[in-house]
Image (cartoon, rainbow, N blue to C red):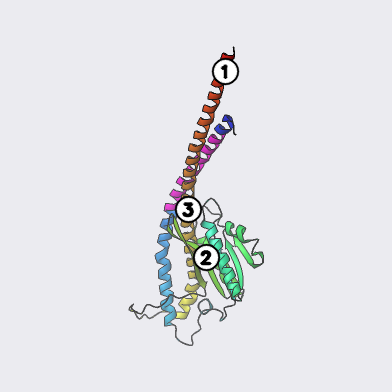
Amino acid sequence: MPSLKDLKNRIKSVKSTQKITKAMKMVAAAKLRRAREQAEAARPFSEAMDRLLSSLAASVNEGSAVPKLLSGTGKDQVHLVVVATSDRGLCGGFNSTIVRATRRKVRELQAMGKTVKLLFVGRKGYEQLAHEFASLIIGKSEINSKKLGYGNAETVAKDLIARFDAGEFDVCHIVYNQFKSAISQVVTFQQIIPLALPAANDNATSAAYEYEPDETEILADLLPRNIGVQVYRALLENAASEQGARMTAMDNATRNAGDMIKKLNLKYNRTRQAAITKELIEIISGAEAV
């Protein structure tokens, strides 16, 4: 049975931990607001880029030289999965959900006879999958900057385009957590190479446009930029999801610490009362013996 001193030290330790988790929750809440605003601001631009590229692709004349980033290699054998996670922990199940989804995707592709390669953006995903899929990893990078910028995504995009031009893969997906709310993030697989065009809406009225220069030239210029835009959107969604998951995790940790402090205080008081009762019994017994 722990002594009163041990219980007192334990209560003090848990209270210190509770202060830390409460402070981390407040910091995550402040960062979440900014990250959510960035993610929500990026969505319309990303969706508009998809619509524009879809319209351009539909307008390309037959026989024209279609950019490789749109047409693909003509094969579907080598798949590259870009795993976007965080560099830091203490964010609940944010990283583990992405890792589990990646593991399932890799197993699924391998069962279909495909060759799978992994590229990591973020340290935590690499740490959790490096041992299991060491032979599949072709690269990793970390987002070390305190403020996420387009330059981070552009670096990843240029690396992907260079690898695609070198013939290292046929299809590329990026996996990330799409932000819904502080307690809800959805694991999303998005194909970025070759461009996966959205399904046409039969009810939508399509307008006729004339492009200058022609569609293929515009596509050749916009498609590389689109990869950077889509990667940037994924990183922004991840950043908001990470802060939401961290805020929720720290809130739960703070509540659990409060419950533990109550239990330890109750145990401390009972132990103290038992010690006092024992001392009184010993004093009374000694007095009666005299």
**Residue type, mark 2 in image:** Val
With 75 as the anchor, is 134 left or right in this view? right
- The magenta stretch spans residue 24: yes
Secondary structure of the residue carrying numbered label 1: helix
**Does residue 155 show up?**
no
Secondary structure of the residue carrying numbered label 3: helix
Q: Is residue 11 above or below residue 146?
A: above
Measured Cα–Cα span from mark 3 to mark 1: 62 Å
Which of discs 3 and 1 lies nearer the camera? The answer is 1
Q: Quadrant of residue 122?
A: bottom right
Mark 1 neighbour density, 10 Å: few (under 14) some (14–19) many (20 or more): few
State the extent of the magenta-drawn residues as a range.
9-33
- The magenta stretch spans residue 31: yes
**Residue type, mark 3 in image:** Gln
Residue at the spot of label 3: 243
What percent of the width, then of the height, locates residue 69?
52, 76
Residue at the spot of label 2: 175
**Residue type, mark 1 in image:** Ser
